């Protein structure tokens, strides 16, 4: 089964993708991760992408398509894909359909994690992590059991991401809406878009997604 998981930064796409990978043996295909891996491995596509980025230019749709095509070939037909961060335009959506067809596959679902913007701002701006082990916390919803001490490793050093502020979060929301608006009608016309409550608990969101995929 191949799906697209949509949602603004902070909506929980990464968490839900990880659960799908664990519970459904799917593969998360993040264009950013694939690009970095290809560049590091110095594959032909990676070298082409590096040359483009070194010139300060954006990687073309053709290069991204080549990355996805190579990944699907490596995965084989028995593993489902979760597309993350792609497609973002109708042209990319059409290209993805063609790539999938060439592999004897088709897109089954587009799942959007719907969020409340104000609640999402609160969720993101309050989060912080242990600087040593990366365990996540929140100023209002998940403080360490002992104040100032990480539950997991005992470290007393914590950090906030510098871009986890209200102005940046609201800008990300605007960018998300601008980027997803062009592709949603394309998939809605095929009746494969389903929205879930992205503000629910992690388990509840996972249950909603499982119900869609079952």
Image: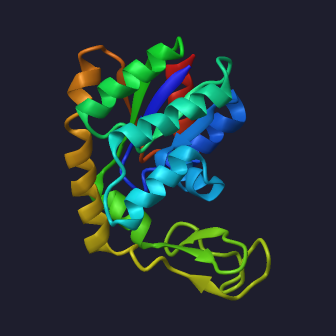
Q: How many marks?
A: 0
Above or below — where is 212 with respect to 123? above
Is residue 201 visible in the rendered structure shown here?
Answer: no
Tell me residue 26's x, y (percent): 64, 30
Name the quarter where the N terminus is drawn: top right
- The residue located at (70%, 88%) in the rendering is 156
Above or below — where is 165 with respect to 212? below
Is residue 110 visible in the rendered structure shown here?
Answer: yes
Above or below — where is 160 with respect to 93? below
Name the quarter where the C terminus is drawn: top right
- The residue located at (25%, 64%) in the rendering is 170
- For the residue pair 6 and 102, the one nearer the viewer reads as 102
- The residue located at (30%, 24%) in the rendering is 94
- The residue located at (24%, 23%) in the rendering is 186
Tell me residue 211's x, y (percent): 53, 22
Give the quadrant of residue 55.
bottom left
Give the quadrant of residue 95.
top left
- For the residue pair 92 and 53, the one nearer the viewer reads as 53
Q: Residue 70 vs residue 92: left or right?
A: right
- For the residue pair 18 and 101, the one nearer the viewer reads as 101
Tell me residue 45's x, y (percent): 51, 45
Q: Residue 65 vs residue 18: left or right?
A: left
Q: How is the image coloured?
A: rainbow
Tell me residue 153's x, y (percent): 79, 76
Hey, which residue is sitting farthest top in the picture?
A: 104
Above or below — where is 70 with respect to 123? above
């Amino acid at each position: 089964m191949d799906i697209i998981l949509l949602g603004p930064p902070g909506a929980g796409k990464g968490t839900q993708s990880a659960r799908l990978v664990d519970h459904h043996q799917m593969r998360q295909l993040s264009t950013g991760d694939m690009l970095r891996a290809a560049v590091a491995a110095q594959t032909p596509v990676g070298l082409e992408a590096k040359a483009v980025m070194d010139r300060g230019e954006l990687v073309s749709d053709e290069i991204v398509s080549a990355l996805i095509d190579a990944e699907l070939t490596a995965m084989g037909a028995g593993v489902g894909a979760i597309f993350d961060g792609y497609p973002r335009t109708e042209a990319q959506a059409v290209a993805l359909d063609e790539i999938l067809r060439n592999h004897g596959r088709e897109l089954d679902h587009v799942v959007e994690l719907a969020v409340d913007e104000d609640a999402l701002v609160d969720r993101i701006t309050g989060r912080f992590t242990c600087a040593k082990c990366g365990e996540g916390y929140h100023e209002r919803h998940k403080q360490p059991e002992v104040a100032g001490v990480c539950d997991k490793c005992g470290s007393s050093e914590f950090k906030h991401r510098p871009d986890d502020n209200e102005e940046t979060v609201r800008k990300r929301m605007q960018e998300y809406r601008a980027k997803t608006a062009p592709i949603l009608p394309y998939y809605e016309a095929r009746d494969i878009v389903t929205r879930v409550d992205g503000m629910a608990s992690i388990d509840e969101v996972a249950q909603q997604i499982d119900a869609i995929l079952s």
